[in-house]
């Protein structure tokens, strides 16, 4: 009973946070347009570079050029949603100014409220950024007769559904990681270092820079175990067919395990942070 | 006090201010070094997988990569003030600059010399060093000329782009993220030899935004591969100047924008 | 010849607007409406060298537009302005080298630098010769008592301290004209007094022509011989403070707090010529009276005869009210009660 009340409360908080964020983003529509153009351009460079590399070698590769290209476009479209670039800057500013002290000492479940905020922050841009980009990369290039640069639709409906389910997991995982970045600011100095270095690791090991299947074979087991592959690589592989739809269970399990670990760790950090604030008096 | 001396004073002041936050500065430099190192890791991954890029080796690509990153690090450190120019206009601080009897370009260049970009600069330098020694390119006078002309031309071009981007703010008020295509996107593009790109793409970056002229062409001269692509050697020597021409055009446009700002007074 | 001459200055801005809310934002994607806003509708005045003038009016009246035009960073739509024979917006750089500007709301000092370093940088920006700089700087340090602040980074200064440093910064190049934009805003009483004393001294000893914009009537009363009031982009009044009060409204306010229980829910009854009831909340009553018909002393005497008074204050009507009254008179001359001539154009 208590649990379901909590859930309903979080859901409605999520909805209003999502709407607020969305309206805010709509106001910066030129920024959104610019963002789309930038992602498009970026994707284009990546596609051209990958095409040049693929044509330089006759050997069979772990994925085809067309699969790699689709992987790149999904990454460009969804990067705001699935890559935790930074923590929640508003909360971090509150932490820096010390204003967060009062919030921390209140009896409400701060972690789930902040996590809800992170989810809204990740999902609100999807409509404005992802859908236009996916549409362009799906339809524009074929009309320009640049078929090999286009996003290819999945082989089966099953692949698409598996992708969408894994994407939800990826967004939750991304929000959980965002929270780690946010909370690390409770430890000022090391927090700043973590906020500078951690996103870089995430960008590389999620597959944002180079699709993970193209990494050297000896690195593959490590990449598969790390949480970051659950952000981009595994959902995208379901989409392009590098992973069969039947692997969905495995992907979701991987995500679920990491989400629980990261959330438990984040909760523990918040608790420690509160204790520190109490001891140091803010 | 002439403009150059005054700029020196501004830089001194900016460094002094940044040094008050030493730990943050150190972490940011480290972070930057990490980011750029990992970017090169990406290129290494692709070469490990495919062996070569068209007929370019990783050491050759490293030369393009190192040069453009060094140039961008410098331009970014110099032109930070222009990068955040939108904020300056929005909160009215630009009026304060207009109230001082100096060119606004000088004052904005002087707002900040971002030291943390040095991470990227050092990384670029190391990679160029590795590239030149692996390819056993002797540092003869023509090679040094080509390298420094490419560097100066690229810095000028990137400065021109950030100034151009800031100039648009006079009309739009919101800062236009789209110009990142030319700065960050330009770096990404020029990390690889332009020959791998489509023809229209090469033309755009030669004749409209002369990115290929300031990096690719002179470096073809350094790598001694200009004739392969039908580029006369004198072109390699002259083309980097186009970066400076671009910068001068951007400054001219800036003056027009400033006059527009004073007549509308947003 | 006057130091500053302004003739028929006009400025029209074009403002983009979109309807509020989500739908408005979406529609704004497609087209934007623009609307003309006349910030100045023909402003003229002239100042002699060494004059100290209060330039007042409500927000959005055109104060800062005028100041921006006079300081050369905004070009008017039409009109003329000569300052020392220069047209400000024609040669910004040589003009701004001769003026000083102090904004109460923001500093021109470098946030992370010790004050003296900011001064040195300004010296280089304004090309002040070293000997002149040394002399001016030591004078200002003494006058404003800055000695103990010089090595402190600006971010650590209190608002009052920062304001004093900002004054020094604006005067290092010995300008002949000073624009002060709300220089006392947010200051505590002691700092306000110090700032006023400094402005007065500066104006008297150095003959710096000064234009002061402010919302604080005490600033005006302490400093200005002359006041220009602007409202809706037009000059409503130009003259001495006394003239202004007598022209527009000689009325003063008397606020009385009565001992409880005397009114019994009734309105205060007080039929005296030249006095009327402005408002009444509980036992607190505000009367407006005309001192030419009844003096404050007489009025207070009359009231204490009838009621037990707990406390009372005599106030000048706030500047907003004077301006509102001026503005109403401007539109509807019939309402003008005191018969004075409006505007000093």
Image: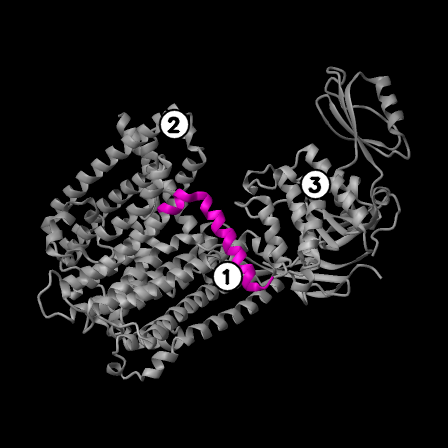
Quadrant in which residue A43 is drawn? bottom left
Say yes or no: labels 3 and 1 on the same chain. no
| Chain of the residue where label 2 is placed in the rendered structure | A
Q: Foreground residue, A52 or B103?
A: B103
Marks 3 and 2 sit apart, C-alpha to C-alpha, by: 42 Å
* Local crowd size for mark 3, using a 10 Å CA cut-off: few (<14), some (14–19), many (≥20): some
Q: Chain of mark 3?
A: C
Labels 3, 2: front one: 3
Q: Tell me the residue at 19%/57% (across/down).
A: A211
For disc 3, the marked residue is C144
- Mark seen at residue B169: 1
Q: Decide: few, some or many residues near mark 2? Use Cα within 10 Å; few <14, some 14-19, many ≥20.
A: some
Residue located beneath label 2 in the image? A277
State which region is magenta: B1-27
Asked if residue B9 lies in the magenta stretch, the reply is yes
Q: CA distance from mark 3 to mark 1?
A: 39 Å
Is C127 drawn above or below residue A12 in the view shown? below
Q: Nearer the viewer, mark 3 or mark 1?
A: 3
Position of B100 compared to B45: left or right? right
């Amino acid at each position: 009973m208590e649990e379901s009340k909590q859930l309903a409360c979080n859901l409605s908080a999520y909805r209003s946070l999502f709407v607020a964020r969305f309206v805010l983003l709509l106001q910066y529509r030129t920024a959104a347009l610019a963002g789309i153009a930038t992602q498009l351009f970026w994707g284009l460079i990546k596609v051209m570079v990958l095409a040049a590399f693929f044509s330089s070698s006759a050997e069979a590769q772990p994925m085809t050029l067309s699969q790699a290209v689709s992987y790149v476009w999904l990454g460009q479209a969804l990067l705001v949603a699935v890559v935790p670039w930074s923590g929640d800057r508003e909360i971090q500013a509150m932490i820096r100014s010390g204003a967060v002290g009062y919030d921390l000492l209140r009896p409400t479940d701060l972690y789930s409220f902040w996590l809800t905020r992170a989810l809204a922050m990740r999902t609100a841009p999807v409509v404005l950024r992802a859908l236009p980009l996916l549409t362009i990369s799906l339809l524009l290039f074929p009309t320009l007769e640049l078929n090999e640069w286009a996003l290819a639709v999945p082989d089966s409906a099953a692949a698409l559904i598996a992708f969408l389910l894994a994407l939800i997991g990826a967004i939750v995982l991304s929000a959980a990681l965002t929270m780690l970045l946010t909370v690390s600011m409770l430890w000022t100095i090391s927090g700043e270092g973590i906020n500078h270095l951690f996103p870089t690791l995430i960008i590389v090991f999620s597959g944002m820079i180079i699709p993970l299947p193209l990494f050297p074979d000896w690195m593959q087991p490590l990449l598969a175990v790390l949480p970051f592959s659950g952000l981009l690589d595994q959902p995208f592989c379901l989409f392009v067919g590098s992973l069969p739809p039947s692997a969905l269970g495995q992907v979701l399990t991987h995500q679920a395990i990491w989400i629980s670990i990261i959330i438990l760790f984040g909760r523990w950090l918040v608790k420690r942070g509160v204790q520190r604030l109490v001891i140091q008096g803010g | 006090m002439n403009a150059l001396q005054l700029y020196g004073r501004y830089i001194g002041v900016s460094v002094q201010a940044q040094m008050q936050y030493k730990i943050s500065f150190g972490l940011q430099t480290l972070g930057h070094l990490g980011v750029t190192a990992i970017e090169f890791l990406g290129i290494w991954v692709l070469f490990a997988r495919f062996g070569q890029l068209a007929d370019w080796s990783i050491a050759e690509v490293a030369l393009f990569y190192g040069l453009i990153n060094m140039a961008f690090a410098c331009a970014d450190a110099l032109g930070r003030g222009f990068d955040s120019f939108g904020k300056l206009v929005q909160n009215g601080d630009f009026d304060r600059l207009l109230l001082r009897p100096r060119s606004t370009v000088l004052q904005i260049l002087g707002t900040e010399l971002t030291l943390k970009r040095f991470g990227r600069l050092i990384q670029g330098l190391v990679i160029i060093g590795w590239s030149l020694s692996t390819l056993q390119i002797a540092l003869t006078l023509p090679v040094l000329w080509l390298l420094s002309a490419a560097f100066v031309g690229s810095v000028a071009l990137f400065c021109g782009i950030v100034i151009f981007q800031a100039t648009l703010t006079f009309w739009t008020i919101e800062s236009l993220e789209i110009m990142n295509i030319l700065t960050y996107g330009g770096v990404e593009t020029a990390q690889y030899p332009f020959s791998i790109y489509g023809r229209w793409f090469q033309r755009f970056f030669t004749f409209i935004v002369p990115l290929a002229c300031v990096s690719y062409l002179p470096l073809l001269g350094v790598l001694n591969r200009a004739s392969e692509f039908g580029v006369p050697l004198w072109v390699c020597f002259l083309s980097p100047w186009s970066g400076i021409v671009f910068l001068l055009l951007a400054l001219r446009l800036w003056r027009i924008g400033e006059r527009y700002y004073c007549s509308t007074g947003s | 010849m006057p130091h500053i001459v302004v003739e028929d200055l006009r400025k029209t801005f074009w403002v983009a607007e979109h309807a509020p809310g989500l739908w408005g934002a979406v529609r704004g994607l497609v087209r934007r409406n623009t609307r003309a806003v006349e910030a100045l509708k023909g402003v003229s005045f002239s100042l002699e060298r060494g004059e100290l003038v209060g330039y007042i009016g409500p927000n959005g009246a055109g104060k800062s537009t005028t100041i921006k035009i006079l300081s050369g960073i905004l070009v008017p739509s039409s009109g003329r302005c000569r300052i020392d024979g220069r047209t400000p917006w024609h040669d910004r750089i040589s003009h701004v080298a001769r003026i000083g500007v102090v904004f109460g709301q923001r500093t021109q000092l470098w946030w992370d630098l010790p004050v003296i370093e900011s001064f040195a940088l300004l010296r280089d920006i304004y090309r002040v010769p070293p000997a002149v700089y040394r002399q001016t700087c030591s004078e200002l340090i003494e006058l404003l008592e800055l000695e103990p602040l010089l090595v402190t980074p600006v971010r650590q200064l209190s608002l009052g301290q920062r304001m004093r440093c900002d004054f020094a910064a604006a005067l290092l190049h010995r300008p002949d004209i000073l624009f002060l934009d709300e220089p006392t805003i947010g200051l505590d009483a002691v700092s306000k007094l110090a700032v006023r004393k400094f402005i007065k001294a500066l104006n008297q000893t150095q003959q710096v022509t000064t234009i002061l914009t402010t919302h604080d009537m005490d600033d005006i009363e302490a400093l200005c011989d002359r006041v220009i009031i602007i409202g809706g982009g037009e000059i409503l009044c130009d003259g001495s403070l006394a003239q202004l009060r007598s022209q527009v409204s000689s009325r003063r306010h008397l606020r009385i707090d009565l001992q409880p229980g005397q009114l019994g829910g009734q309105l205060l009854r007080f039929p005296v010529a030249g006095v009327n009831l402005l408002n009444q909340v509980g036992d607190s009553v505000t009367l407006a009276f005309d001192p030419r018909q009844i003096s404050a002393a007489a009025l207070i005497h009359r009231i204490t005869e009838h009621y037990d008074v707990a406390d009372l204050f005599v106030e000048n009507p706030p500047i907003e009210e004077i301006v509102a009254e001026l503005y109403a008179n401007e539109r509807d001359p019939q309402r003008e009660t005191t018969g004075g001539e409006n505007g000093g154009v």
